[in-house]
Image: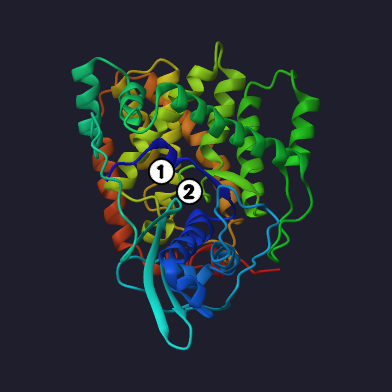
Amino acid sequence: MAVSVFDLFSIGIGPSSSHTVGPMRAAGMFLDSLGGLRPRVRRVQAELFGSLGATGHGHGSERAVLLGLSGEQPETVAIDAEPSHEFEVDLVLHRRKSLPAHPNGMVFRAYDDDLLAEHTYYSVGGGFVRGEHGVAEDTTELPFPFSTAAELLAHTRAEGVPISEIMLRNEGSWRSREEIHKGLLRIWDVMAECVRNGCEHDGVLPGGLKVRRRAKSLYAKLLAEDGTGDSLQAMDWVSLYALAVNEENASGGRVVTAPTNGAAGIIPAVLHYYRRFVRDADDDGVARFLLTAGAIGVILKTSGSISGAEVGCQGEVGSACAMAAAGLTEVMGGSPAQTENAAEIGVEHHLGLTCDPVGGLVQIPCIERNAIGASKAIHASRMALRGDGRHVVTLDKAIKTMRETGADMKVKYKETARGGLAVNVIEC
């Protein structure tokens, strides 16, 4: 399967790529699959299983399905859009039932008086959807195909170019270089807008936990303190950027899936660090950062997982940390070997991280976890840049370990809100 950087960084709405963006896309796919049968449809039944059924209510999955059945798309739907469709919808969330292929399963059925159509879909993380019917994988032949870090590094050595250039040449299979550059800066613009919005909004996040938004007040404090000589203040700004994004995500705002919504704050936070604190940072660096991060994301998705419901939060925050660390390392002048090392550090030190959202909401511990993940990405990059690229544990070995750890992890720690902090924190 060919994966584009624009598949990994897609524009959508919060609070979850797997529970909001994916179900909306799946519902839209089902609607499109009806074709000429659509005028006959009087009722649609949608069943959500596994993690979708367990935490779909807190993740906005019900509204997402209804919007998808209304013809809305995650990239263009209005934040305050209301569902509107010409048929009755029965929506069922199965809290204790799962489908065999993936924890995030959905079954859609269309009826008049009888059953007209039935399709099964899976939201496999990052807004990606696959299904038993109507979902074809991209089979584009890329000039430099890779699914492992070893393959990617072999291409960089053979061509004498950085990771971003390999990714750029592959992206050329779909778009011109001008379109790629413009599209990447569009992604950055949405990320930056999300940070701005997060710094402007205050109050309490929806969902019942009464979590206060902190980004606006922190932003005011940092502006007032700027220039006071605190040598670590840059990291406070990084935390701010991540908090702003994930508070917007938790409120259902527009974010960039990077590579998931639950981990959407890490890459924007590290990119903001690059633009604000790195000398000579420019738009070309932003594009190279995103291309490099995207290359690591391809490996994580194809040989590991970016799904919290499949492997826990090590697949979300761990993946985002690795991608951000790699992107920063390249734009700081790191070699491909140092860049791969930075990504490996990011994965290795999130191994075993559970996904245990309190109340099934993408708030606790998700928001702060992004701020910590962004800081770890910067530290991973700096450690790699101080070395020569040689290290014992390869990125491929770390990703294999992540996959195996996820397989061994109990289901209650995989985005079900039935373990960890989710059962040890009293809801307000």
> Dot 1: what SS?
helix
Which residue is farthest top? 280
Tell me which residue sits at (54%, 27%) in the image.
185
Query: Which residue is label 1 attached to?
Result: 319
Tell me which residue sits at (44%, 50%) in the image.
126
- Three-letter amino acid code of the residue under disc 2: Thr
Q: Residues within 10 Å of mark 1 (few under 14, many from 20)?
A: many
Considering only vertical position in the picture, is 160 above or below 378? above
Sequence-wise, the earlier of marks 1 and 2 is 2
Tell me which residue sits at (40%, 36%) in the image.
5
Q: Position of residue 289 (x, y in %)?
A: 45, 26
Residue 412 visible: no
Q: Spatial distance from mark 1 to mark 2, Cα to Cα?
A: 9 Å
- Which quadrant holds residue 338? top left
Looking at the rendered image, the quarter that the C terminus falls into is bottom right
Foreground mark, 1 or 2, reads: 2
Query: Which residue is label 2 attached to?
Result: 260
> Dot 2: what SS?
loop
Residue 40 visible: yes
Considering only vertical position in the picture, is 234 above or below 107? above
Please give the count of numbered marks on the rendered protein.
2
Q: Residues within 10 Å of mark 2 (few under 14, many from 20)?
A: many
- In contact (CB < 8 Å): disc 1 and disc 2: yes
